[in-house]
Image: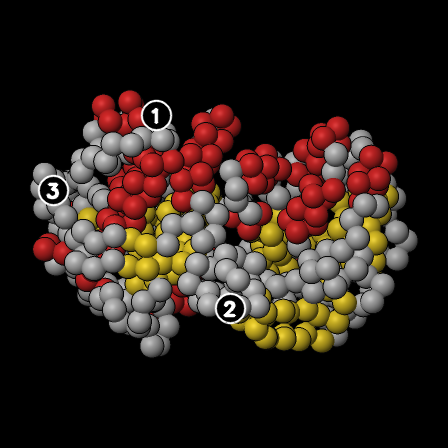
Amino acid sequence: MSLVISAFFPFGRYDAADAADRRRPEYPPSFARLFCALREVADENELPVLDLLEALPAPQIWAPENPQAEDQRAGFVVANDIDRKSSSQFHPGRSNASKTRAGVTLTEPTVRFCWPTTEFAAVDALDRILARVHYLGRSTSVVRLDASAVVPADAPQRCFRPAVTGTISIRVPYPGYRHDLETTFAAGGSAWMVPAREQRYVYGTDAATAPATDTNRPIASNFDDMIIWRLDVRPGAVAPREVFGLTTLLRRAVHRCVWASLGHEDPYPEQLTDEHAVQAGIHPAISGHIRDGARHLTFTSLVDVGHEHAHGRPLGVAVLLPRIEDAAQRKLLRQQLFRAIGDTPGLTRLQPWRISRAIDIERVDPTQGRTPWTLQPRRWSGPSRYWATVTPYVLDRYVKRGGPREAFALSCELAGLPVPRTVAVHPAPVVTGAITLRDSDIAWGNRRRRPQYHVAAAFDQQITGPVLVGALRYMGLGLMVPLTERHWQSLLTQDAKRGQHRGVS
């Protein structure tokens, strides 16, 4: 028995933008996008079929290696989001926004998702759901879908195959993906807020690669979602050294929104104590008043790094939602958070505190328009075996032996990550645009001031971010960015004579 889902595009077009770069088309079609289309049309009594589908391993994708042609069309259209600043008399409350529509002309009109050796007990039920899907991606890419338990005789020798290491990343669902989609939707969110699992693929034959196994899948960090805002300010208005203050403004703004959304007329307390949080009914993952070792919201600034002209200035801010296993607690957290900050535009201003001026912000939808790479979740998620800090790593403990390298390894364990194989500690940034901070740039409060370093690390397995390590990681310090293997090897070459890197056992 097998399972084959066939997608026939009668017009030979597939219009959908890549999740990482909206200016480029997605190719081949992703299993995660197909799954979202199925959830949209499935009835309540058909949801168990989708639960079976999301639990399957990553499929083979039968499609030519490259499309016949790619195209991108940019233009200004009326945005869906309400804009209070809009002055349009024809579309009150609306504004024009630049949108890029990307698509491909297919070499062959049929794309298949195939599980050659997987038994699927609900093929007929799945086929009935597929019949109700009329487009995949944009509404311009009309599709006809069907399911079969028989592998076609014209199976290609070469196709997209799951691999342990590959150069192609394709989004696939995971067990619990449907639940996360529904929870986010019920809380007022959108499907793009639920990141699918990134599966590595290669294009080749069976002999070219072995299927990925559970032990070879990337290790996930403690975060499973990012809510991102861009700074609606002139370039350079917020300096790199102000990132901690900016993150503090975001944290206070979110707490104030949650406080108000729960119906409290009293002013938000300047210091949110345990007693305040419990009496207000604020989810402990939001308030931060939570038992030791448990996960809570993380606030961070997103800085421009990693390219020749990177300047390190913050382009946006983000709230990172923790990965919570308990479904009821995960649902409650999302409901409180999205009810408070709202869907777009939602939270639009950070009131002054450590920064002496208000900062206007705008919610980012990575699926719409031209989103800068810095403000895309994929920029910070990898996966990769090599990571480096873009904001300073602050020691969260002192060790008698091994110095900051050993401390960093212990910090990784505390953050839920494996122990790195190699650690390189630097007094200065190793990524172009990464920032350094003075002690006066950080609100230490009643905490003892601690040393700061920039760190690059290699792990035995790929890590899926975002990754934050060290003290004050919940306030955006110790934020790391994935590196390419070439960049890592370059760092090792530069440091070899100075003895800056060392393995950690």
**Residue 473 % position (x, y):** 27, 45
Which of the two discs, 2 and 1, sits closer to the camera?
2
Residue placed under numbered mark 3 in the picture: 445
Point 55% across, 51% down: residue: 192
Which of the two discs, 3 and 2, sits closer to the camera?
2
> How far is disc 3 from disc 2 in space, using C-alphas?
47 Å
Q: Identify the amino acid type marked 1.
A: Gly
**Residue 368 % position (x, y):** 55, 62
Q: Are marks 2 and 1 in contact (CB under 8 Å)?
A: no
Residue placed under numbered mark 2 in the picture: 88
Mark 1 element type: loop
Residue 281: numbered disc = 1
**Crowding near pointer 2: few (<14 within 10 Å), some, many (20+)?**
few
Q: Identify the amino acid type marked 3.
A: Gly
**Residue 416 % position (x, y):** 36, 38
Q: Identify the amino acid type marked 2.
A: Ser
For marks 1 and 3, the one nearer the N-term is 1
**Crowding near pointer 1: few (<14 within 10 Å), some, many (20+)?**
few
For marks 2 and 1, the one nearer the N-term is 2
**Residue 127 % position (x, y):** 84, 41
User: Is 205 placed left or right of 296 in the picture?
Assistant: right
| Above or below, comparing residue 174 to residue 304 in the picture | above
Residue 334: numbered disc = none
> How far is disc 2 from disc 1 in space, using C-alphas?
41 Å
> How far is disc 1 from disc 3 in space, using C-alphas?
26 Å
Point 30% across, 46% down: residue: 253
Which of the two discs, 1 and 3, sits closer to the camera?
1
